[in-house]
Amino acid sequence: MYINFGSGTLSGGRIVSNTAETNGGGLFVWSGSATLNGGQIVSNTAESYGGGVYLEYGHATLSGGQILSNSANIGGGVCIWQSGGVFTQTGASAIDHNSATSAGGMYVHDGSAVLSGGRMMDNHATMSGGGVRVSFGSATLSGGQIVSNTAGGHGGGVYIDNVAAMLVLVNTTVSRNAAGEHGGGLSVHEGATMLTYTTVASNTASGVGGVGIHHSGGAITVQNTIVAHNGVTNCVGGLTSNGYNLEDGTDCGFSATTDISDTDALLGPLAYDSGVWVHPLLGGSPTIDNGLCLPGLTTVDQRGVTRPQGAAGKCDMGAYELVPVAPASVSVEGADDGIVGENYTFTATVSPPTATLPLVYTWTPMPDSGQGVEVVTYSWTTPGTKTVTVTVENFGGVVPVPATRDILITDFRIYLPLVLRNCQ
């Protein structure tokens, strides 16, 4: 399909297995507009730029559609060439399995790309920019996924290579990308990059350092972001922190008072949740309620879950907002009887084990000692039947779940050894 000044709409159809000697193997938009409503652009080839889609000055909108398995020299899936070119991706869209010498999924030479909720997955570049490469233009991803892309050079997920380039990631997961050189997740050579509510995890690179984020020029600003589990080093090159970030190492240089470093993020493995790929937060993660809510930027997480969750009214770090799971029951384990003056330890546990932590425990007759699986020590000064009571609620403000245990406390003691001697 070639659009000069007009417009074209593809609703549910397919553009398959076409070839262009120069640009735009599947779709070429010179100065008009194209809309793909659930359509597919599959297995097309361009000798130069834009195996699936090529935009000169035109506009293209991918709404629930797919750009799959296309190839080109540069920009296997999509290429935006001039400053007037605009590519917009919305809904459950996918740019997957495309390949190129550079920029396997998308190449923004100039112009702009705005991806809202879409997926950039399993694209490959022989050189740099497995998922996305941005040169003079800008790319904004909100609620997106840059997952399992590969590059033989820099930037398995994303490569930024010009002072005029800009990358903005909001509510985005960058995971399982791989680079043959530096920057398994992101490689920033020049330009401006901003990460907010973003999770950069489980990326790999063969070069020395810079597995998660490699910064050799330009500026990278991060806020409410998690960088974790990226092999030997999470970052190379200094990042500018606006606070509320967490790293499980000390490579990224997070130095704001609200940052957390050298701490396990307690991320779950990459999982498909509500139609997107995310790293869920596990119970007890230090990222829970330690982020900054930014209602002017977004009020939802990557999945569309409302931020914040829970009674604390605080947002979580990263792309995932944890929804509290209420404990269904609580049990108290410990001694059934004892004597005055001795110390006895009782443990409270909740069911199901997936109940969201941290939990709030209230003990009677003694207050709780912390969070998680509660262990409290008691000592009684008078005999009688004692009742240990524990009430559990989680930070979501759920209805408290109580449990009791009765212990008989006596006022006598037996000391051993007892020696009996025959005096006859």
Image: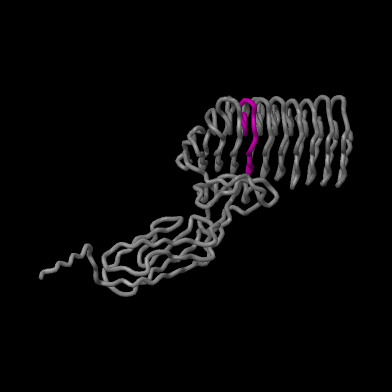
**Residue 306: where, in percent of width, then height?**
62, 54
Q: Is residue 360 left or right of residue 160?
A: left
Color encoding of the figure: one colour
**Residue 343: where, in percent of width, then height?**
30, 62
Q: Is residue 216 left or right of residue 75?
A: left
Q: Residue at x 24, y 68 (%)?
A: 413
Residue 30 is at least partly visible in this image: no
Q: Quadrant of residue 96?
A: top right
Q: Quadrant of the N terminus?
A: top right
Q: Residue at x 68, y 26 (%)?
A: 152
**Residue 222: where, in percent of width, then height?**
56, 37
Instruction: Tell me if residue 207 is in the magenta stretch.
Output: no
Instruction: Tell me if residue 184 is in the magenta stretch.
Output: yes
Q: What range of the chain is rendered magenta?
A: 170-187
Q: Residue at x 87, y 43 (%)?
A: 10
Q: Nearer the viewer, residue 267 or 103?
A: 267
Residue 407 is at least partly visible in this image: yes
User: Which residue, as the protein is rendered here, is positioned at the far front?
Assistant: 424
Q: Is residue 6 above or below residue 208?
A: below
User: Which residue, as the protein is rendered here, is positioned at the far left?
Assistant: 424
Tag count = 0
**Residue 125: where, in percent of width, then height?**
72, 28
Q: Is residue 315 above or below residue 155?
A: below
Q: Quadrant of the C terminus?
A: bottom left
Q: Quadrant of residue 60?
A: top right
Q: Nearer the viewer, residue 151 or 95?
A: 151
Q: Is residue 216 left or right of residue 410?
A: right
